[in-house]
Amino acid sequence: MIRLQDATLAYGDRTVWRGLDLHVAEGEFLVVLGPNGSGKSSLLKVLLGLRRLTSGTVTVNGRPPRRGSDLIGYVPQHTGVVPRTPLRARDLVRLGIDGHRWGPRPPRPETRRRVEAVLRDVGAAQFADVPLEQLSGGELQRVRVAQALATDPRILLCDEPLLSLDAEHQRIVAELADRRRREHGTAVVFVTHVTGSPADDPVLPLADRVLDLGEAKVAAA
Amino acid sequence: MSWHEVWGQIFNFEDYGALLGLVRNSLIAGAVLGLVGGLAGTFVVMRDLAFAVHGIAELSFAGAAAALLLGTGVAGGSIAGALLAAALIGVLGARARDHGSFIGVLMPFGLGLGVLFLSLYKGRSANKFGLLTGQIVAIDTPRLSWLLGTSAVVLVCLAVMWRPLTFASLDPDVAAARGVPVRALSPIFMLVLGLAVAVSVQIVGALLVLALLCTPAAAAVRVTASPVLVPVLSAAFATVSVVGGILLSLGSSIPISPYVTTISFLLYGVCRAAGAVRARRGWTSRPASPDRRAVPA
């Protein structure tokens, strides 16, 4: 699904990573670790087509990355919403389907059905109509996973989505990503921070492989 | 002056029918302005831009004052000033954290320039005062066409970018990942907002634009979180405020702005109270503490 060959990324004269070779197969769960500034998020930006490699090649599903592709779902870090944001959980999910389109248009019936389906999938159906501001951090991240899955992507990119969640919700969100790849063969690239002991970490046990950008090598988990 | 006399100055409905005919243009302008202010205000609340609106209004005031001094159209002057301010804020204060202090720098400068131009102006003083606190009788037909034209541009732009702008306001990273041109959208919206401010300045005055561009939307989000109902309610509140303000102020010698701001503030108060009741009863019915619930297998 994802292939990087001899990939180098630099900002000005600071090289973030160099000579990165990476292949992520269908249904594979890759965990990406590394200290701040090691280019974890930049790697996701390259895969999203938001940033170009300085040298080397990258392909996603056999083609160069393209902005806004339906093939990729993206789950961001947990950030709260601006107070009184006039959106509910189901509206957030809908934005994942047609939020990039210009012009006014009511949601199509199939869009509505899809929103219901993914909300049910992540166990968020019971708070579909709750304003975003009133959701707990864990609930909001679950809804963001639903948003990322709304286009039925073949690749799921997670950019430290567990940050500032309690242990219970870290486990729930990580398991949602894991279930997706087991049931749909979606490749998962999961950027995370390991804080406690590796055995207690909610993500590491799910990984097929771990990419440590601090050391820039791929190791089998 | 007795209370009775004061009251008579604030509310005076003698010869109401005849007066009504004179302000036909103003009523049309007011209704359109309510629509523009209420809809643009939705994003002012979502993107936390109330302070930016105020900053743009002061430079729009300076532009209008300069136009008054030079004898060119006030409408053109207020639009030029507003667009300049919006462009400066959009480019120089691109990141939200820089916004506040940059607007704080811009605002007194604009106000100072405006005061300078007004001091140099030797014409009717009602014109001067009107730029700050609003005037409604002065809407002649060419000016109404300007106003309607500018409003139409704002409304079309808002309709086209509504969804991507909502997405980018909520989660810029996710919107960018989905292909929304987040970085271009922010200054473009700022320019559209500049136009909305410029038309509002011409009616309610520079000091009071927030009563149209912030209060109605802030009231709407108190009672609902529906992305359809909020703009509808916000536009309705703003329209009621302006048109109601014009109708109440007709016979009096007082500018329309206190009427507009009071109606809009009262609507906000009612919505806030209603929102508090709704929050206490539970905003929506949902099972208690769904947090405890595990993901269904």
Image: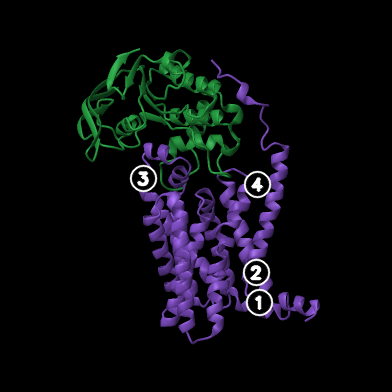
Chain colours: A green, B purple
Distance, label 2 to label 3, CA atoms, is: 40 Å
The percent position of residue B51, horizontal first and vertical second, equals 51, 57
Give whichever of B153, B217 is nearer the camera.
B217
Residue neighbourhood size for the residue with mark 4, other residues' Cα within 10 Å, grouped as few (<14), some (14–19), many (≥20) = many
| Residue that label 4 marks | B223
For label 1, the SS is loop
| Residue that label 3 marks | B181
For mark 4, name the chain: B
| Residue that label 2 marks | B258
The percent position of residue B254, horizontal first and vertical second, equals 65, 76
For label 3, the SS is loop
The quarter holding residue B294 reads: top right
Do marks 3 and 1 share a subunit?
Answer: yes
Distance, label 1 to label 4, CA atoms, is: 32 Å
Distance, label 4 to label 3, CA atoms, is: 31 Å
Do marks 4 and 2 share a subunit?
Answer: yes
Amino acid under disc 4: Val
Residue shown at 71% from the left, 53% from the top: B270
Q: Which mark is residue B254?
A: 1
Distance, label 2 to label 1, CA atoms, is: 8 Å
Any part of residue B152 in sight: no
Q: Is residue B291 left or right of residue B142?
A: right
The percent position of residue B183, horizontal first and vertical second, equals 36, 47
The quarter holding residue B276 reads: top right
Give whichever of A81, B23 is nearer the camera.
A81
Residue shown at 47% from the left, 74% from the top: B114
Q: Are the residues flagged by discs 1 and 4 in contact, CB closer than 8 Å?
A: no
